[in-house]
Amino acid sequence: MKIYIKGIDDERFHRPLRLIGNLFFEETELCFTEGDATLEAEFFIEENNDGVSIKGFLRTEDGEEFVASKDQQIASHIEGKDHLRQVKNTLSYVYLTMLQDYTGMTQKWGILTGIRPTKLYHKKRQEGMPEREIHRMFKEEYLLADEKIQLMKQIVERQLQVIPDIDSLSNEVSIYIGIPFCPTKCAYCTFPAYAINGRQGSVTSFLGGLHYEMKEIGRWLKEKGIKITTVYYGGGTPTSITAEEMDMLYEEMSETFPNVENIREITVEAGRPDTITKEKLDVLNKWKIDRISINPQSYIQDTLKAIGRHHTVEETIEKFHLARTMGMNNINMDLIIGLPGEGVKEFDYTLSESAKLMPESLTVHTLSFKRASEMTKNKHKYKVASREEISTMMDHAVTWTNDHGYAPYYLYRQKNILGNLENVGYALKGQDSIYNIMIMEEQQTIIGIGCGAASKFVHPETMKITHFANPKDPKSYNDGFKHYTDEKIKILEELFIKE
């Protein structure tokens, strides 16, 4: 969809206009000179001492016109980026209103296009805004549907039950350890993940660098007396490496990280059932790690084949029972709504199969066409459900989880997500993942260790975020892991060490 934008000269407004357009059309192209656009959107922005007033006109090729306007008060003490944000939100409000009228589509998340809507809820709560005022803000200023506001409220309340001290954990850190190998690469995946077969040299070199990073980061945390809240082994698939390599990794953690026995939660993703063995589960038990993920994604064999997962449905079930009998008492499973060839019937079958296993937590993802994934590059090969079907599947997931005793405890959203929906983590009581909450709500520093691991440094007082990423390919990581470790420690020094 090509849209001609008039009256907007400031380039800082282009991105929010593009994001709002993408909620309605698969690919939105904005142009700022008259031409062969399908739609024309003209805006009149008037700023004064009291705030901003924006009026918009949306015109079609057939001469139809849709009009919207909004006056937004902005307090005089609000300046700079905060002032600009309010003007952007007002512009987005006007644009979204016109596009809803034009298309007949209602966006239940309103003008919110960010990944972490509950973070904004927490921010307003921490500022002392009453709950009623938070809800009014989301409804009237952000145009959220009541059901999305209630979902956020439910999640924030659950998070405060799970981590009552969430507001005071900025002086601690969590650690993400990235292991970039998998049996095969899934079609929808953009994580740093390399097929492990034939790469033993790369794996060995990588693990040497990983041990070095763990040792140095652990030493620094010990010296400075900084606690670790959670540790999360992700990837890739961390159980792609051998049982012996896993054992050595957890031994390194135990010896070099401070007070490992007091870490609130340690998770190891074992997402690909074809990587799980009795020997590897023995290693997890040895180091008292009992929270793992075993991810079916779907219980339809043809779907697994289409997306490049080379395990069987039976293998998922078999490995789940093996893990359960060997003492894994906090198992997460991931499901994906909208996988190629699947509709409501197929997803309902997947839910019915999940009921037979009843994992402690269940994350329901909505398929996202990520830019670098094989699925996005070859969209013509992958037929996915309509927006209406996707919405119905999500409704069925909400009903199913509620009926089976699960409650939502975290959510996040992605660009190009089908149906403009969300990914929601559900858990039985007391089985919520603390790491998932901390990474989504950005209440503390997450130190990323390993290939492709992204660090997110949160200033303990200002909460300002600094990003730092290790390289995604094993060779670059192997060549520079000492440098990347030193750089992270420098940032940690600036954040945590007061003069």
Image (cartoon, rainbow, N blue to C red):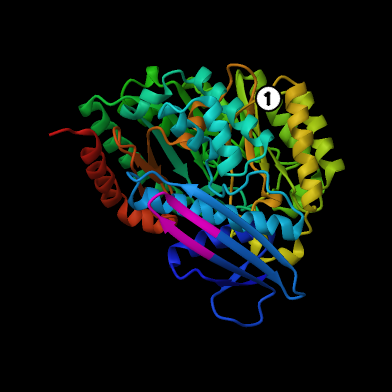
Q: Nearer the viewer, residue 280 or 119?
A: 119
- Secondary structure character of the magenta stretch overall: strand
Q: Is residue 67 above or below residue 116?
A: below
Q: Is residue 319 above or below residue 304?
A: above
Mark 1, Cα crowd under 10 Å, few <14 / some 14-19 / many 20+, is many
Residue range in magenta is 44-54
The residue located at (68%, 25%) in the rendering is 359
**Lateral position of residue 24 relative to residue 234, left or right:** right
- Write down the residue under mark 1: 359
The residue located at (25%, 43%) in the rendering is 491
**Farthest-out residue, left:** 499
Image coords of residue 261 (percent x, y): 39, 17
**Farthest-out residue, front:** 49
Considering the image in quadrants, where does the N terminus appear?
bottom right
The residue located at (62%, 46%) in the rendering is 110
**Residue 198 appears in the picture as rendered:** no
